[in-house]
Image: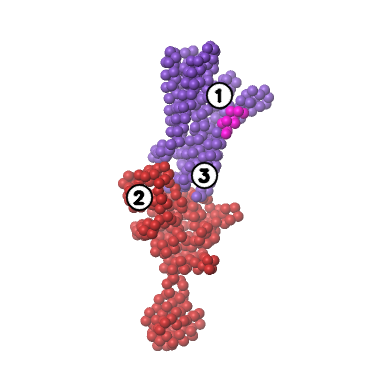
Amino acid sequence: MSEPVLRTIGLSKRYGRRLALSDLTLDIPRGTVYGFLGPNGAGKTTAINLVLGLIAPTAGHVELFGLDTRTHLTEALRRTGSLLEGSQAYPDLSARDNLRIWAALSGGATRERIASVLETVDLAARAGDKVRSYSLGMRQRLALAAALLHDPEFLVLDEPTNGLDPAGIREVRELLRSLAADGRTVFVSSHLLSEVEQMCDEVAIIKEGRLIAHGAVADLTHRSGVLELRVTDTEKALAALQALDWVPSVTADGRDGLVVEAPPERAWELSRALAEQRVYISEMRPRESTLEDFFLEVTGEEEKSG
Amino acid sequence: MGSLLAAELLKVRKRWLPYGLVLFMIGGAAIVIWVGGYAEWHDQNDLQYRQTSLHTFAFPWSIPSLLDSGQFWGALFVGILVSSVVATEYNWGTVRQALIRGQSRTQYLAVKLAGLVLVSALSLLLALAAGLGFSLLATSFADQPITLDVPDGPSAPEVALMILRAGYAVIPYGMLAFCLAVVGRSTAIGAAGVMAYIIAESITLAIFNESGTFLHDLRDLFPGHYAQALMGANRIGTGEYNHIAFRELPVPSELPDPNVAALVLALYSLAFLAIAVYVFRRRDLRA
């Protein structure tokens, strides 16, 4: 397995008595779109600021491209494109002039490259206007253009879809997927869980500064532990499955359906138990849960809102 | 480094503030030459007063009178410009954007400082050039010869040295503003801080200059005392001139040696710079 692009090792940050981030250890594999989720105030932005060296950790450290950022921060950041929460642009300058300035700081970019990223984020028509006159969504597009300007290997994006309309959100999603397809790695924090689910390969969820879950999106959304079955004989199947002591509950669902609470990895045992009773399965699938369901379950936000 | 400096200059030249401040400085130069000099000379009968007024506007005596006023107001000009340029980067979030692109914090400050030194120097030279233009015009209106060849008059290289001394005496105040703006992350703190300091220092030095007690020696603690020493070295002859700085005319015999003064001002500047760099390198830059 290749070395992770980003690795945080025991990363912690304390502000006075408040622990904003506690012992965050994460590996972000190359070529993935990695989502970073958490309720408001969970420590997402703190973690991103630590990764980018904008704030100093209380404990732990960060490695970018295998480089320890305590000693090689500028080198690592030159290979990274970042979008921070909130606007970071010179309001009295045009988008084009802003990008000229950022290009100078990133080692230079041609006029063609500047024009190309402006085109990518759909700002070419307004590139000569002062940023002061831009809407929130346009400023966000400019920030994204700035992040892409030097064609970085790794993108760190804090709420990139903030202020964008649905079409803009979709464009960003497609852009990030295409960047990952080109071999780039994207680390993205967002509140839009449905977007994250569609856009990300893996996610990490933090709450109150602590990592509480991480893994492939597909695994997390299928981790509900509920299987839906269609069988040839519902009554016999009910009896057979209720007899299994490791199955907590089985309920009938319609004429030939069953809902079985059981870990998906033991599905083959269900199949064998039913076959022994000459009951056959015509369909079996894990009950789909969304990333939002999983997020609310692990963060306890559901109980709070309920 | 060249492209970074070009980017820094692009930011500054797109702002209205430097242009406004240059116009303000040119206005000040016009007041020195036309109001404090030519008009007073034209309307006065008192011979000694006419001589003082002549030394205010007529070339080459106008050079120290312009530089003396320019050093005082230039320090304020530079203080406001520096504070605004430094602190607005915090307000706009652009300081964070610069650092996440791989610019080191020390490099960030170095480029900003280099850009400010260039813009300030050009602006002050522009105002001085305008002032000298007014002076040449007023000198010819007064039917006085335009020449450097007057008693104790400077040579051309000495004129350059006089300009350098005045510019040098602005640096500690610029550095104070830089330090205050970096530490305070606010234009108001930087600009108001340096303005309050310059005015308070002028008043304090005026009181201490007149005092016969230990307060007289306390002048040695103030950068302004050493700035005055440099400005004193710019005098042509012993004649007085009018100026629009809120302080007494420097009397060279009561002031430190200009070389010592230059050294002390360098130490003050380095101290302010060191504080700014130390704080900025260690600071958490949150939104």
**Compared to B110, does B139 lie above or below?**
above
Question: How far, Cα to Cα, is label 1 from label 2?
Answer: 56 Å
| Label 3 secondary element | helix
Question: How far, Cα to Cα, is label 1 from label 3?
Answer: 34 Å
Residue under numbered circle 3: B281
Q: Which residues are magenta?
A: B196-204
- What amino acid is at disc 2? Leu
User: Which x, y percent locates residue B80?
Assistant: 50, 35
Q: Is residue B110 visible?
A: no
| Labels 1, 3: one chain | yes
Mark number, residue A176? none
Count of picture labels: 3
Q: Which residue sits furthest left? A: A112
Q: Does the magenta portion include B202?
A: yes
Residue under numbered circle 2: A123
Mark 3 residue crowding within 10 angstroms, few (<14) / some (14–19) / many (20+): few
Q: CB of mark 1 within 8 Å of CB of mark 2? A: no
Q: Which chain is purple?
A: B
Q: Nearer the viewer, mark 1 or mark 3?
A: 1
